[in-house]
Every structure is written in C-alpha cells, then in structure tokens.
C-alpha cells in the first residue's frame, strides 16, 4: 500500500511497511525508513510505487490550471479527494489525486488550508489582491536586479539620486533601493558608501558629512515653521550707562555686553548685560517648543544652525545703536577690586558698540594695556579696568597664571578654507570669560538662596555633569555654576533666565523643583550638546584635511602626544603615525601626510625623521 502524507509543511509519498493504527512504519520515496503518525496520512492508494506516483503527480499538477480549479471548487470547504474526483470526472488514481493535492498545497493565494486534506477557495477580492501583490513583487524583483546590475557597472539608477544620503547614512532597509544596493555590495565587496561614491553619487564630501548630521538630528530640515511673533518685551527701566559687546565678526546671536561707571571715590559699578529672550518667549509657547526641540545652536566651520528663528534673534540680540531688553547683573566693586554688592534686574540697555575680535585684538592686548604710547580706541579705559578686574576674579578662584593655549578659527569661503591660530587666554578672552563666570556663579547662588530650581554645571574628580541642585565646580573653583549667559544659543540658559528673572522680581518660580520638564530638558540638552560638539569637531577635522590638500602639503612637523598619536603643527588635527621608533610625549618629528580620505575623514601619516623635542 502506498500513501501521500504531509511532513514539515511538504507533501511527500511513501510505501507502508507496517500499519499500527495510530502510527505507521513507512519507507519514503527516497528510500528512508521512518515512523509516521496516522494523523499525517492524506491519501492511501494501491499503485504505482511512491517514487513513480510522486513523479506522475508532479507532471499532472503542472498541467492543472489553478484559476480553473479555483472556479470549479465553489465557495464551501472541501476535501482534496472530492475535488480531484470532480476535476477528473471519475474516481482518481493515486497520482491524479496527488496532482490535485499538490496544486492546492502549492497555491495558498487560491486555496486556504482548513485542516487535514481540506481546503477552501479564497474569496474573489482576496485572490485579486494577492495576485496583484505577486505581480508587484515580480516587477520589484526584476527592477531590483536591474538596479543592482547598474550599480555594479558603475552607474547610478535615476531613483537613487534623491536618496543618496539617506541610503548612505540612514536607509530604509525595507526599500527596494536599499535591497538593490546591498545586492550590489554583496557582489562587489564594497560598502554602500564606497559603492555609491564609485557610481559618482557623492560629488561633495562636505555635503556627505553635513547630510549625515542633518538626517540624524534635523530630519525635517533646518528651516523654521511660520510662527506667531513673540510677545513684545515689557516696558523696562532704562539703563544709565552705554554698553558694548565683544564678539567675533560672524556672531549674530550677541548674548552679552558690559557697561562701566567710574565713581569719584574710586569705586566702579560694572554692568553685565545678558540678552533677555525669556521676556518674550513664553513657557509652553510654539517658540518655546521650537527651542526645546533644538536645544542649542549648532556650530561648524563656515556655518551654523541657530536655535531660534532669525526674526526672534534680531529682536533680542544686543545689537549696537539701539536699546535692548536685558537681564543685568550690577556689581559694585571697591577700588581694590573686591565686590561690595550685587543686584539683578531686567532693564533696557543702550548698546553703544559691538566690538569685534578681529579689530580689537591688535589694539587691546598684553603689549598695549596701560601703555601710554599705544594708540587710543573706543572704550579703552573701560576695557583696561575690566581686564584688571578679570585678573583679580581669576586669582580669587585660584586660577591665576594659567597657561595660554592655541585655538583656531576656520574661515570657509566656498571650497577654500583658512585656518587662523588664535591664542586663548589673551586679555579679550580673559575679560569676557571671567565676567561670564562671575554672572553664572552669582546667578546660580541667587537661585539656590531662593530655593528655585536651576540647571547647574558641576565638576568633581575631573567629571563634568549637569544637575538641578547647586554643586561645586572644581575645575572653575566655584561653589556652583549655572549656565545663564547664552539664552539665545542654549535652551538651558533660557530656562535659567526665566528662574533668575522670577527671583529678581520676587515672583514665584516658573518651574517648581519637581517639574518633570526640567529633568527631561536637562537630559535632552546633554545628549544634543554632546552630539553637536562632536559634529563640530568632525567638521573641523574635515576642513583640516581639506586645507592640507588645498595647500599641497606632503610633509610637516608634528608633536608626539603618546605612543604613535601625534598633533600636526599649526593645526587642531590629531592622527596616528606609522613607522616611528620609540618616542616620548613632546618629541617633535617630521612626518609625511597623504592618502586623504574625505569620506572617512582620515589620512595617512608616516614617520620620516626626528626633529628634536618641543
């Protein structure tokens, strides 16, 4: 006796060797002997043998039209043997019944399996939809193969052009384009990025890196939605002294300015004035949600992505020759630079000048300060006094005589870049940073004294963290430090400014200490700020490579940092060097640079010779 049975989802044929009612000993069509449960048997028949029956069933099944079989099956559930009898118009042979069984089993879109050997024809609309899906999959498979072949030969399929950066950085892995790309990568051995580049899809390495960042952090684009204008600043008392800011020429979000009033008794009143967008951006407003989403301005060589719309920035930036709303910290200073008292208030400050680093540094520096022969310039007296005050503040924090370090300004004009070294810790930097540290620390204390929640930067054992409670910042030598002086550029500062304004006025805090929004904003800010800084460093490295290529530099000096890690001379570029003997930190060497990879942001750096110690 022969049989057809189901095993592991397949229809098989075999010969019965022993029938034990609940189970059978059989020999499969391939000669394998096994035990089979009786419940798996679909059909018993006399002849022919299993192998011949299966071969005949497959041949007959290939001649059956599934559409015709579906039409004659009717709408009710049926047994395959009954349908086989109707199809052949007689009691079917084993191979004939097996042919219908194989057809039913192999056409799941036509027939739904309802039980052992039982099926039901699919509804007409379901069948039509399933057929359409199969046709679509067939077309997609053909298109996928065509695209993969085109990619392998170095061509770029037209539909890929609008998705190049998405495919390179953040692909939809279910898309047909991605699947075709991975097929081509598997056959060429190239990564998706390298294959796209080979096909000419990445003409701009700069755009490649920029789009990677934008897809991750600005998937909806960097533009701003059309929003209702912010509330106008309230009527504020007028300040009594002209103020000036100090920034580089590219700065448009001017957050801070200073005023100085000299008194006959030798005391001085210093005004530290901070732009006050918190006066117009209401908590929970559309603008507030926008700022909370971006969290910070993003900086990169040659550009930036602002936290706030240009119109809002224009309204609150401390631009010269106009009265600007500000949160002011007034510091009464004795002739010996000791602080006598402090007061905070919102007022309207007349900004007399926006001084710029590029024009101020040649005039205000260590060689010209208190030098009678040096040429005069606007606010010279105020700047020189503030520099002395800044030195006193620095010493009071235990941070005097810190070593100056080199920083670099990147000036990008189209495809060309200029990298200009700049000494950090010069008089301009010290003046501005010390007054900002003073404001951030004293406003942090103000919040703590009023028991208002605030966002603090704390440092202990070399680790910097953010906290909603005042805590020491060991690196700055302060009891507490709350970012408050860049509210146009950092959402944390905007939140703190709202709290400071409330404390200065004696109002209730805008945010209670247990407000979950504060915890969420602090967490989100830290993540975003780290990501934005990483991107800035990455793009600075990119433009360093571009500068080396632009200037045609093949050899240069480098300083060993540790082992094979070196910093190239005159650039903020750290890389690994190969082929060097044993060297120590500070050793100066001559290296060869080349093999620039602007997509991976890497270069080859090879040791040539020693050049002494730094």
Image (tube, grey):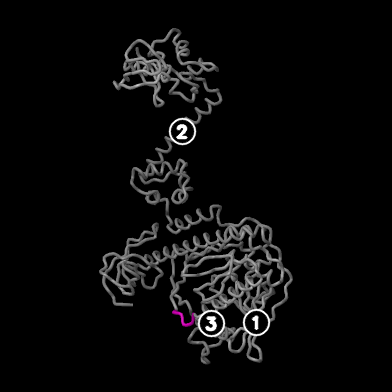
| Closer-to-camera residue (7/80) | 7
User: Residues under labels 1 and 3: Cα distance?
Assistant: 16 Å
What kind of element bears circle 1?
A: strand
On the image, numbered disc 3 is attached to which residue? 396
Q: With respect to residue 55, does 244 lie above or below?
A: below
Where does the C terminus fall, quadrant-wise?
bottom left
What kind of element bears circle 2?
A: helix
**Label drawn at residue 137:** 2
| Residue 54 falls inside the magenta stretch | no
On the image, numbered disc 1 is attached to which residue? 341
Neighbourhood count class around disc 2 (C-alpha, 10 Å): few under 14, some 14–19, many 20 upward? few
What kind of element bears circle 3?
A: helix
Q: With respect to residue 338, does 559 lie above or below?
A: above
| Closer-to-camera residue (426/104) | 104
Residue 231 visible? The answer is yes
Q: With respect to residue 500, does 126 lie above or below?
A: above
**Label drawn at residue 583:** none
Please state the total of marks drawn on the protein image. Answer: 3
Q: With respect to residue 35, does 336 lie above or below?
A: below
Residue 205 x/y as whole percent: 42, 57
Residue 526 x/y as whole percent: 53, 62
Residue 271 x/y as whole percent: 63, 79
Q: Is 166 on the left-hand or right-hand side of 379? A: left
Q: Is 47 on the left-hand or right-hand side of 214? A: left
| Closer-to-camera residue (59/135) | 59
- Name the front one of labels 2 and 3: 3
- The residue depicted at 40 percent of the width and 64 percent of the height is 546
User: Residues under labels 2 and 3: Cα distance?
Assistant: 74 Å
User: Residues under labels 2 and 1: Cα distance?
Assistant: 77 Å
């Amino acid at each position: 006796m022969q049989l057809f049975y189901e095993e592991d989802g397949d229809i098989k044929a075999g010969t019965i060797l022993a029938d034990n009612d609940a189970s059978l000993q059989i020999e499969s069509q391939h000669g394998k002997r096994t035990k089979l449960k009786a419940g798996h048997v679909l059909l018993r028949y006399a002849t022919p043998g299993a192998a011949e029956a299966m071969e005949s069933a497959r041949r007959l099944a290939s001649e059956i039209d599934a559409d015709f079989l579906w039409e004659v099956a009717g709408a009710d559930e049926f047994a395959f043997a009954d349908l086989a009898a109707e199809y052949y118009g007689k009691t079917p042979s084993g191979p004939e019944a097996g042919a219908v069984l194989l057809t039913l089993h192999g056409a799941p879109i036509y027939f739904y399996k309802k039980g052992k050997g039982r099926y039901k024809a699919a509804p007409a609309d379901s069948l039509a939809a399933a057929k359409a899906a199969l046709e679509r999959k067939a077309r997609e498979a053909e298109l996928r193969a065509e695209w993969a072949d085109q990619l392998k030969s170095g061509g770029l399929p037209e539909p890929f052009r609008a998705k190049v950066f998405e495919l390179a950085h953040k692909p939809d892995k279910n898309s047909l384009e991605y699947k075709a790309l991975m097929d081509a990568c598997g056959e060429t051995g190239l990564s998706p990025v390298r294959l796209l580049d080979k096909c000419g899809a990445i003409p701009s390495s700069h755009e490649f890196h920029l789009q990677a960042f934008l897809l991750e952090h600005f998937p909806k684009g960097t533009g701003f939605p059309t929003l209702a204008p912010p509330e106008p600043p309230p009527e504020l008392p007028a300040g009594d002294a002209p103020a000036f800011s100090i920034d580089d020429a590219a700065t448009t979000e001017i957050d801070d300015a200073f005023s100085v009033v000299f008194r006959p008794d030798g005391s001085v009143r210093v005004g530290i004035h901070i732009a006050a967008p918190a006066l117009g951006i209401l908590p929970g407003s559309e603008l507030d949600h926008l700022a909370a989403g971006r969290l910070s301005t993003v900086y990169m060589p040659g550009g930036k992505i602002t936290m706030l719309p240009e119109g809002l920035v224009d309204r609150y930036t401390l631009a010269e020759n106009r009265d600007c709303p500000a949160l002011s910290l007034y510091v009464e200073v004795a002739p010996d630079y000791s602080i006598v008292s402090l007061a905070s208030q919102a007022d309207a400050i007349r900004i007399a000048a926006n001084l710029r680093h590029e024009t101020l540094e040649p005039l205000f520096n260590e060689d010209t300060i208190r030098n009678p022969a040096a040429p005069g310039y606007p606010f010279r007296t105020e700047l020189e006094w503030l520099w002395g005050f800044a030195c006193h503040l620095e010493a009071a924090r235990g941070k005097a005589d810190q070593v100056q370090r080199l920083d670099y300004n990147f000036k990008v004009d189209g495809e060309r870049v200029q990298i200009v070294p700049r000494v950090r810790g010069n008089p301009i930097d010290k003046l501005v940073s010390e007054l900002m540290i003073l404001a951030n620390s004293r406003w942090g204390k103000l919040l703590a004294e009023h028991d208002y929640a605030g966002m603090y930067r704390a440092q202990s054992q070399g680790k910097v963290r953010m906290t909603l409670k005042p805590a020491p910042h060991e690196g700055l030598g302060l009891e507490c430090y709350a970012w408050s002086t860049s509210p146009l550029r950092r959402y944390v500062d905007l939140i703190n400014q709202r709290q400071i304004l409330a404390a200065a006025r004696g109002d209730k805090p805008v945010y209670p200490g247990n407000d979950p929004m504060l915890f969420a904003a602090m967490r989100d800010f830290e993540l975003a700020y780290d990501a934005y800084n990483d991107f800035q460093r990455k793009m600075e490295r990119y433009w360093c490579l571009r500068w080396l290529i632009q200037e045609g530099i093949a050899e240069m000096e480098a300083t060993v940092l540790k082992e094979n890690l070196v910093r190239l001379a005159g650039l903020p570029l750290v890389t690994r060097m190969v082929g060097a003997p044993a060297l120590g930190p500070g050793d100066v060497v001559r290296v060869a640079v080349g093999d620039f990879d602007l997509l991976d942001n890497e270069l080859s750096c090879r040791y040539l010779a020693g050049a002494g110690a730094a």
